[in-house]
Image (cartoon, coloured by chain):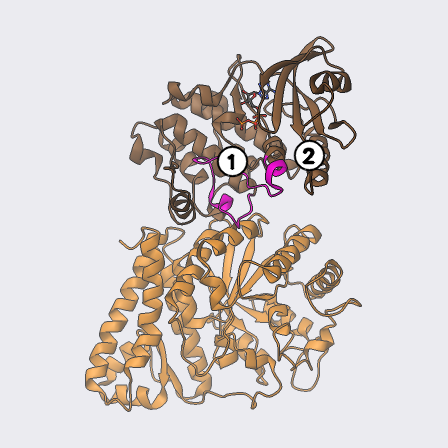
Chain colours: A brown, B orange
Amino acid sequence: MYDGDLQADVQAALGTSELIPLITGGQKLVFTTELEGIPVVAKVILVPEGPHADEVLERARREVELLSTVESEFVVRVLSEAVEIGDRPEAVCWVEEFLDGDDLRNLVGTFPWEPSEVWSLLRDVGAGLAACHELDVVHRDLSPGNVRRRADGRFVVMDPGFARHLTKAALTGVYQPGTPGYMTPEHVPGGRPTPASDVFGLGILAFQALTGAGPMPYRGDEAEYYRQLRNGQAPPVASVRADVPADLASVVDRCLQRQPARRYLDAQELLESLPSASDS
Amino acid sequence: MSVLIQDGRRGGHLRWVTQALAAGLADGVIISPFHTPRVSIPRHQAGATVSAAVIAAGGEAVFDASTHARLLPGSDDVLHYDTWQLWGPSGIGLDSDAKRLEHLERVFARQREMSVPTLAPTLTLESPLGQAADDAFRTAELARGLDPACWQTLAGRRSFWRAGSDLDAYIGQLASLRAPCWALTVVNDIVVDNVPDLADTEAFSGLLRTVHSLSQRARVIICHADYAGVPAVAAGASDIGAGWDRGMRFFDPRSFQLTTPGIQIPASYVTQGRLGAVLRRDTGDAIARLGDAFATTLRGGPMPADDTAERSHHLRQLRDLVNAVSGHGVARPGRIGELRNFYERSMADFDSLLTRLPRTTLQESSRMRWVEQPYRALKAYAEAEGLWL
Ligand SMILES: Nc1ncnc2c1ncn2[C@@H]1O[C@H](COP(=O)(O)OP(=O)(O)OP(=O)(O)O)[C@@H](O)[C@H]1O
């Protein structure tokens, strides 16, 4: 437990206006606030007591620093360093730009989407991931909870590979990335997510946006889900929705190849295979 | 491209391979430091001389550093090998950054001296998981760092190719290096005769699945494969390493060891092209007694008069089959269908031969190992891909 007034200390350390809780609970707190008059989000990770504390801190420092070097209008911008709070320290926090609009998870009710909207999803999230991959950052946890559609229609990637990473590592010391229903064959324990895993993750989002349901849904049995991921092949888009243009279906199908070598190897390669915005 | 002749220890090797290239029986040569010295000695030309002669004969020369053979326990026939000086002060092995870098720099330098493509070395893997697999990946990654256009090698025992989704994940990692060419080897624990052993259907279908994946974006060579490599051509490989002696046709650990009792000269074999099999000469003679025209059809040509003629005959038969399969272009269904038909016809031919010849002349096991096992591997792979139509 933090003895002082965590919220006030975070606010002081980050130099923001008053923090308004957006999401609190667990090991992670998200606040909206302003920094020099600009709307921003402050994120706070509580550092666990015990042997994992140093690791959590070290990771936070490293990943926030790395993320702040990603330059893309399709990736949430990190606006500060990782700042430590307290003597132990008890928490680590940083500032991100505030993204207006909605999480993809709040839009699943509007699926299935028109092909043109799914092309945009592929193009925007693809560009965001490409900016990460260029710096050897793998997102590792693409899900509808961390892609946001902004008011202007642009899709932006949040949380690349680290915020979640930190939260869960804080709890267990071992980070097992992934959200059930949105994992990839490389997410099965023992595996190692790579850029091609992010390509698969984007394929899941696109498939779901096109058809209304995920290609490899999680049905409550973890062992069965993992077996399916490792040995099964996602159904072709056309087998679920026949009126998807063949070029779009084939891009999504390729993203969803069980074998990473048969996918686009990274987001840049995916981007290069997409038709230009005016053609799709 | 289709058939590359593997290096061998017999004297006269260079003359034979250049003749084969000139006659259009092969497309290139894979040079090994175990069999070709860097500096010429009596009866053995220097590596640079060999590569120059191969290139002059219109062939492709490749230098495979054979590190995956050198690092096998028992590989002590290093007389030629040591002339290449492929290791630095940190010593032999690929288990540290220093060793990897020193070795890679030397291998690439030798390859450049010989005007052959840079082909990175690797080590023999038992499994796609664990330290050795990590070391092999780091070596490959470092090689790409030194030369982004370098070719890569991958060598594994059957257990490696049998590893299912772990294999696929590892291949995904390797594919991310975007090598323009992959040279793959199935490392045998032991080779007891001159007959292919594809009994491990799971391992060979894993190999084929891998070839399918890698060949989507790269050229794939199956080393030391000969007839056993043809299913890989159906899966998308473009070349197979072949030859006539055991150490050329099979990755045989003993061909890197001093204790080997000299060269095994398979003096009396005849390749039966239509069967896709190399049978003993007495069997070939017995087939000939069943009817001349029939025997000629099965062989794919006249009875080779001597070993030199048999070598040419063998290469021609093998290369024709490879070209028939790869003649279907990049479309795998066509390639697979072609080879499937070939095997099915061969099995029928074997069946009829087995009823007409005594068991002492032709055994059921020949049919099994030359045709049925490769057929099963092809089928297992193609069915899983939805390509067994
Ligand atoms: N920069 C931002 N701008 C606007 N909203 C944000 C921003 N970052 C996070 N959010 C909102 O807060 C939610 C949770 O944030 P975040 O994903 O970082 O936390 P998390 O603990 O990893 O959440 P989850 O497990 O739900 O993905 C997001 O789904 C989003 O609605």
Sequence-first disc among 1 and 2: 2
Identify residue type, mark 1. Answer: Leu
Circle 1: element type: helix
Q: Position of residue B293 (x, y in %)?
A: 24, 81
Q: Position of residue B383 (x, y in %)?
A: 31, 55
Q: Within 8 Å: ligand 1 and the Cβ of disc 1?
A: no
* Of A116 and B345, the residue lying toward us: A116
Identify residue type, mark 2. Answer: Glu
Circle 2: element type: helix
- Looking at the picture, does residue B320 appear above or below residue B362? above
Q: Position of residue B219 (x, y in %)?
A: 51, 55
Question: Residue B357: which disc?
Answer: none
Q: Main secondary structure of the magenta part?
A: loop
The residue tagged 1 is: A270
* Nearest to viewer (mark 1 / mark 2): 2
* Of A145 and B244, the residue lying toward us: A145
Structural distance between the alpha carbons of marks 1 and 2: 25 Å
Magenta residue span: A168-193
Q: Within 8 Å: ligand 1 and the Cβ of disc 2?
A: no
Residue A185 on the magenta segment: yes
The residue tagged 2 is: A63
- Looking at the picture, does residue B127 appear above or below residue B288? above
Number of numbered labels in the structure image: 2
Residue A279 on the magenta segment: no
Task: Name the residue: 36% across, 37% down.
Answer: A219
